[in-house]
Amino acid sequence: MDEVLFLLHYCLKRSGNDEQAQSLFQQLQKNYPESKYASQLIPGKKPDLDKPAKSNPVSVEYENIYELFIEGDFEQAVARKKKADSLYGSNYWTPQLLYIEAIYHIRQREDGIAMNALHSIINKYPDHVLSERSRQLISVLGRRKEIEEELGKLPNPDDSGMVVQTPAATQVTPPVVSSNAPALNQPNLPKQGQDSLIAKRPVLDTVKKAPALNVPVNATYSHREDQPHYVMLILYKVDKVWGNETNSAFTRYNREKPANRNLANTLIELDQDTKLLLIGTFENASLAVQYLTETRPLAPSRIVPWLTPSKYSFSLISSSNLELLKQKKAVGEYQMYIQGIYQGKF
């Protein structure tokens, strides 16, 4: 029983439920004071489960299930989660896993399963940012039929070509750093020209493969501060469903801030495992760095909370270096190059 209390304490601490975790800690100290598990929770001692990837195979399995969902292997993800849940219940669920599972079932029109996952987020993680998103999705799902009927009356947008979020004006306005946290991103509410999670229309592939360009592969990157730049979000092994969701999330974020409303997004596929979300353009590197510095800390908690930090990284790139990167397709090499210039920025 002491091990069970220890594992539950660990799960609650990881999910941010400090009050419940403290209650279990007190039970463990009171009822099993001599237990090795109780001693590991004494301040100053490091729990064995601080690194679940090495010491907790159950946590590893649920992390792998999350990866399968994000990478688009939905059939295997659903099967493995069903098996894991039958063995371990809900103790190892995370809000990110439940949210992407809900989105998958919404797209499969399995609203009941999706609702259960969304309610689990609200009940288990009431203070998590995904709890509010879950409430909004539940509200939208309750109006699915009404929304689909309205969407059916709208003309289909032109799906051809790479999707680019068109800015309202051509003049680029420098982003302004603000200390005020942005408003919570709303879910993809159905509007003309927008994809909706609950629309009857099939999911469109808005990711275009980067075209082959006539650039020598032995060319080297060059840095000019005065050139137009993009802020670049690099997505690692992320299915097109989540690439599109990430694109939409940054579009919503930019629209909430007047200084960013002129920014456009472009999502391209660099190779089989890597997608690039380009945000810009900015008139020069300094303005791109300013936007990146402001936005990067908000990504995991406000903009794309369903993505774990291992699935993306920030960078910036000039138009000329972008063409070379498309040809080389070596994003790691480029990251080493740009980080050497902007040490400590990202």
Image (cartoon, rainbow, N blue to C red):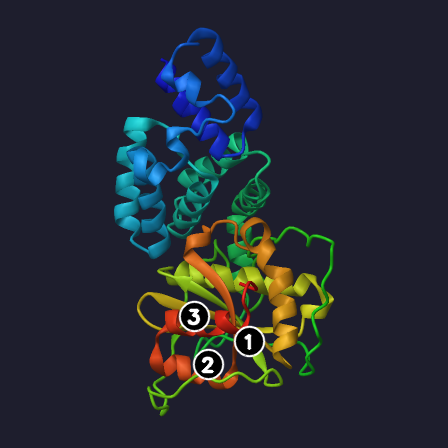
Q: Do residues under tags 1 and 2 come within 8 Å of each other at their CB atoms?
A: yes
Residue 144 location (% of width, % of height): 51, 49
Q: Is residue 303 above or below residue 49?
A: below
Under tag 3, what secondary structure? helix
Residue beneath label 3, please?
A: 336
**Could you say which is closer to the camera, residue 244 or residue 71?**
71
Query: Between marks 3 and 1, how big is the CA–CA gap?
Result: 17 Å
Q: Is residue 287 left or right of residue 145?
A: right
Give the residue displayed 68% in from the left and 52% down from the top.
183
Residue beneath label 1, please?
A: 230
For the residue marked with disc 3, what is the amino acid? Answer: Met
Residue 262 location (% of width, % of height): 66, 74
For the question of whether residue 93 can be seen, the reply is yes
For the question of whether residue 167 can be seen, the reply is no
**Could you say which is closer to the camera, residue 148 or residue 170?**
170
In this view, the mark in front (2 or 3): 3
Sequence order check, earlier mark of 2 and 3: 2
Q: Is residue 72 above or below residue 3?
A: below
In this view, the mark in front (3 or 1): 3
Residue beneath label 2, please?
A: 322
Under tag 2, what secondary structure? helix
Sequence order check, earlier mark of 3 and 1: 1
For the residue marked with disc 2, what is the amino acid? Answer: Leu
Q: Is residue 281 above or below residue 51?
A: below
